[in-house]
């Protein structure tokens, strides 16, 4: 496996919630602190996303995808001036159409998944990601469109084995979102995930991954590029 796949497999991500909600009218929903990563995509409509301790709210449009890797409380709303209602309070009394909760007739549909990590070193991944990752470029939306549509169909029209398919799609969304985030160029960061965004550093990491003995010649990450072309012992 490549380094990113290997690390994700080591951390053993699992999706213990895969679903969404479709809400209409004026609304504001607050979600509490969470473990792991939440990964969502806007299938239809628009709304605002605000994350605790992040200065600026983000306007989400149809096709946008966002990750919340650090578990901070967040709010999704049609209007930032509204007082939010706790998500658990709303969802507990809301009817569901397959895996999607429909509120006020629907209008803004958001689907996604909540990943927990059963591995012991989840901080390796989560510690180098920002509190919010927002993917909004048109090329990124196009790349995610198939996954979004398949997720929506699996949730709205359940078929035999649908739960497993939805979970696999959620994992695809997580990996693809991380790929797109890397492609953005993570300027100014440090650590293995940032290194994967650099062509030379990525080549060095792949070389060490293919032959771990090479890593013995690299005392720290600063010397990794110098080890890239060093022959195997």
Image: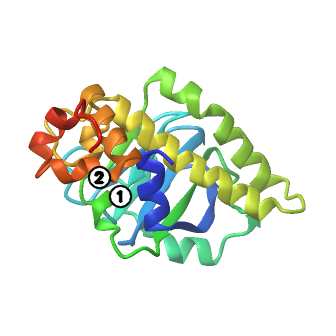
Residue at left 55%, top 67%? Answer: 14
* Side of 74 where 230 appears, left or right: left
x, y percentage for residue 117?
A: 45, 70
Look at the image and tell me whether residue 191 can be seen. Answer: yes
* Image height of 198 relative to 149, above or below: above
Q: Nearer the viewer, residue 104 or 51?
A: 51
* Side of 129 where 35 appears, left or right: right
Q: Quadrant of residue 33?
A: bottom left
Q: Nearer the viewer, residue 122 or 40?
A: 122
Residue at left 44%, top 65%? Answer: 10
The residues bearing labels 1 and 2 have C-alpha atoms spaced at a distance of 32 Å
* Side of 154 where 224 appears, left or right: left
* Side of 83 where 45 appears, left or right: right
Q: Residue furthest right?
A: 160
Q: Nearer the viewer, residue 126 or 9?
A: 9
Could you tell me which secondary element the residue under label 2 belongs to?
helix
Q: Nearer the viewer, residue 218 or 77?
A: 218
* Image height of 15 relative to 81, above or below: below
* Image height of 210 relative to 145, above or below: below
x, y percentage for residue 158?
A: 85, 58
Residue at left 49%, top 61%? Answer: 9
Q: Residue furthest top?
A: 139
Label 2 near label 1: C-beta < 8 Å? no
Label 2 Cα neighbours within 10 Å, binned few <14 / some 14-19 / many ≥20: few
Query: How many numbered discs, if any?
Result: 2
x, y percentage for residue 48?
A: 40, 44
Q: Quadrant of residue 127?
A: bottom left
Which residue carries the number 1 mark?
69
Q: Quadrant of residue 97?
A: bottom right
Which residue carries the number 2 mark?
213
Residue at left 22%, top 34%? Answer: 230
Label 1 Cα neighbours within 10 Å, binned few <14 / some 14-19 / many ≥20: many
């Amino acid at each position: 496996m490549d380094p990113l796949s290997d690390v994700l497999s080591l951390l053993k991500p699992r999706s213990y919630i895969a679903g969404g909600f479709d809400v209409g009218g004026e609304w504001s929903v607050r979600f509490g602190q969470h473990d792991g990563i939440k990964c969502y995509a806007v299938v239809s409509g628009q709304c605002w996303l605000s994350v605790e301790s992040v200065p600026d709210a983000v306007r989400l449009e149809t096709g946008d995808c966002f990750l919340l890797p650090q578990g901070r409380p967040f709010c999704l709303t049609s209007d930032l001036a509204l007082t939010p209602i706790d998500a658990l309070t709303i969802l507990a009394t809301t009817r569901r159409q397959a895996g999607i909760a429909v509120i006020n007739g629907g209008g803004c549909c958001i689907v996604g998944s909540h990943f927990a990590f059963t591995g012991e070193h989840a901080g390796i991944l989560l510690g180098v990601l920002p509190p919010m990752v927002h993917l909004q470029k048109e090329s990124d939306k196009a790349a995610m469109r198939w996954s979004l549509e398949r997720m929506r169909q699996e949730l709205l029209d359940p078929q035999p084995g649908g739960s497993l398919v939805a979970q696999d799609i959620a994992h695809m969304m997580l990996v693809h979102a991380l790929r797109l985030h890397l492609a953005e160029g993570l300027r100014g960061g440090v650590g293995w995930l940032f290194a994967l965004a650099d062509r030379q550093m990525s080549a060095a990491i792949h070389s060490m991954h293919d032959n771990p003995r090479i890593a013995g010649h690299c005392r720290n990450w600063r010397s990794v590029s110098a080890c890239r072309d060093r022959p195997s012992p």
